[in-house]
Amino acid sequence: MDEAGPDVTDAEPLAVEPPAVPLPNRVAAELVGTAALVAVVVGSGIQATELTQDVGLQLLANSTATVFGLGVLILLLGPVSGAHFNPVVTLAEWWTGRKDPGGLGPREVAAYIPAQIAGAIGGAVLADAMFGEALVKWSTHDRSAGHLLLGEVVATAGLVLLIFGLAKTGHLRSAPVAVASYIGAAYWFTSSTSFANPAVSIGRAFTDTFAGIAPASLPGFVGMQLIGGALGLALVALIFTHRTKAVSK
């Protein structure tokens, strides 16, 4: 890449997990954290539909529960695994830190992502069980429209820009509040209600409730989330290149 252009490979890695934490502990944190996140999203959606028929209030209840739940989970598990709960974030951290011997390596990526997906599926099943729903029932909620796919690109790009922008500016301690607040806002300003997470999307296909997504809609959502992640990293490089140059001097 030309030296005059933004170099995303030199971005500071997220690297909030202490290197002393053994990989099994980090993988367990990713599995449990993603499961809890999906249980919050799906469970609050079911609860909301049981309490009111107003779709606006249902979305408000769902987004509010997600904001608080996600913030708590990042605060609790961030020091263990980095609290990714999201394959896009894991891949983005690997990409930005792949030249750093202490960064996230392929072995960690290969362990994190399956744990996130398994946790997401388990969280959806748990939420269904708590509310007496069928434990596994494929969602019939079609989300394949083009404007929803665009919403996923925007939501995921913004999430990656936020997380790695915080890392570049030394404000990762604000991640629990900042990331949860962003997701809460993105519920409302994106057409897709901001899944922004391939693992969570897969988990939500296993429940035919308010937060579900039809399996046929998954490839489009996951593809757009990956594109959004790449776009987010490009924006980090474009906006925060001066930080890298200042550190290297």
Image (tube, helix red, strand yellow):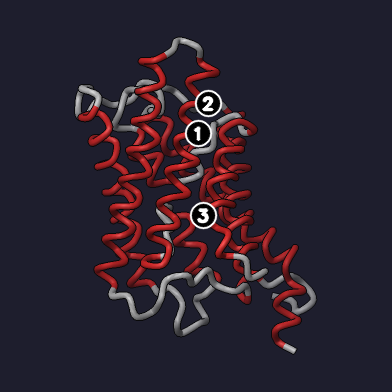
Q: Tell me whether the residue at label 3 lies in contact with that at label 1, contact meaning CB atoms closer than 8 angstroms.
A: no
| Quadrant of the rendered image containing residue 87 | bottom left
User: Where does residue 117 sit, x and y in percent of width and height?
Assistant: 32, 49
Q: Answer above or below: position of 180 versus 58.
A: below
Q: Which residue is mark 2?
A: 60
Q: Amino acid at mark 1?
A: Thr
Badges 3 and 2: C-beta atoms under 8 Å apart? no
Which residue carries the number 3 mark? 176
Residue 97 vs residue 184, the one in the foreground? 184
Q: Is residue 167 left or right of residue 196?
A: right
Q: Residue at x 56, y 50 (%)?
A: 227
Give the x, y percent position of residue 141. Answer: 41, 22
Give the CA separation, mark 3 to mark 2: 20 Å
Q: Secondary structure at mark 3?
A: helix
In the picture, the disc for residue 64 is: 1
Dot 2 crowding, Cα within 10 Å, few <14, some 14–19, many 20+: some
Against 69, is 136 above or below?
above
- Would you call the spot at circle 1 few (<14 residues within 10 Å), some (14-19), or many (20 or more)? some
Mark 2 secondary-structure assignment: helix
Vertical order, 51 against 177 (above or below): above
- Please tell me in which quadrant of the rendered image residue 230 appears: bottom right
Q: Earlier in the sequence, mark 3 or mark 1?
A: 1
Q: What's the residue at 43%, 39% (across, down)?
A: 219
